[in-house]
């Protein structure tokens, strides 16, 4: 009886670790595929991203194309 239980536990452990091993290999292959499809691994620019610049008066980042005044008298974006 003891050997049957031990065999069952070993079988469950082998299946569990085998599943984890295969999942890890698949994750590595998927990451490699994504890296190769991304033309050198550089992040693609977001279509809605805007260039930001820092306001020298208040040190807050504002849109470079739509910069508006921060309300301070020395703000260059009036």
Image (cartoon, helix red, strand yellow):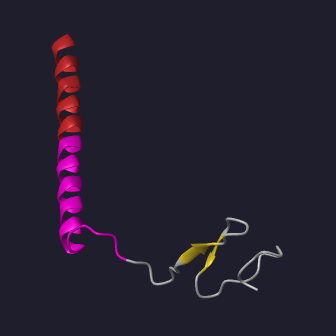
Picture quadrant of residue 44 = bottom left
Q: Which residue is drawn at 21% across and 73% down?
A: 37
The number of numbered badges drawn on the structure is 0
Residue 46 versus residue 10: which sits nearer the camera?
46
Name the quarter where the C terminus is drawn: bottom right
Whole-percent x and y of residue 1?
Answer: 20, 13
Q: Is residue 72 above or below residue 78?
A: above
Residue at the farthest top position: 2
Q: Where is residue 12 shown, x and y percent of the image?
A: 23, 31
Please give the name of the residue rendered at 67% of the width and 83% of the height, measured from the top-left corner. 67
| Residue 1 visible in image | no
Residue 24 higher or lower than 29, as above or below: above
- The quarter holding residue 61 reads bottom right
Secondary structure character of the magenta stretch overall: helix
Nearest the eye: 50 or 38: 50
Q: What stretch is highlighted in magenta?
A: 19-44
Is residue 16 among what the camera can see? Answer: yes
Judge whether 50 appears above or below 18 on screen. below
Where's residue 24, x and y in %? Answer: 22, 47
**23 in the magenta segment:** yes
Left or right: residue 73 compared with residue 35: right
Q: In this view, does 78 lie to the left or right of 46?
A: right
Question: Does residue 35 belong to the magenta stretch?
Answer: yes
Q: Which of 50/22 is in front?
A: 50
Where is residue 60 shown, x and y percent of the image?
A: 68, 67
Residue found at x 18% / y 69%:
36
């Amino acid at each position: 009886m003891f050997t049957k239980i031990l065999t069952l536990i070993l079988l469950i452990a082998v299946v569990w670790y085998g599943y984890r091993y295969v999942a890890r290999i698949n994750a590595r292959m998927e990451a490699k595929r994504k890296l190769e499809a991304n033309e050198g691994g550089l992040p693609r620019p977001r279509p809605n991203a805007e260039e930001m610049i820092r306001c020298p008066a208040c040190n807050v980042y504002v849109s470079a194309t739509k910069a508006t005044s921060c309300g301070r008298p020395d703000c260059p974006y009036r």
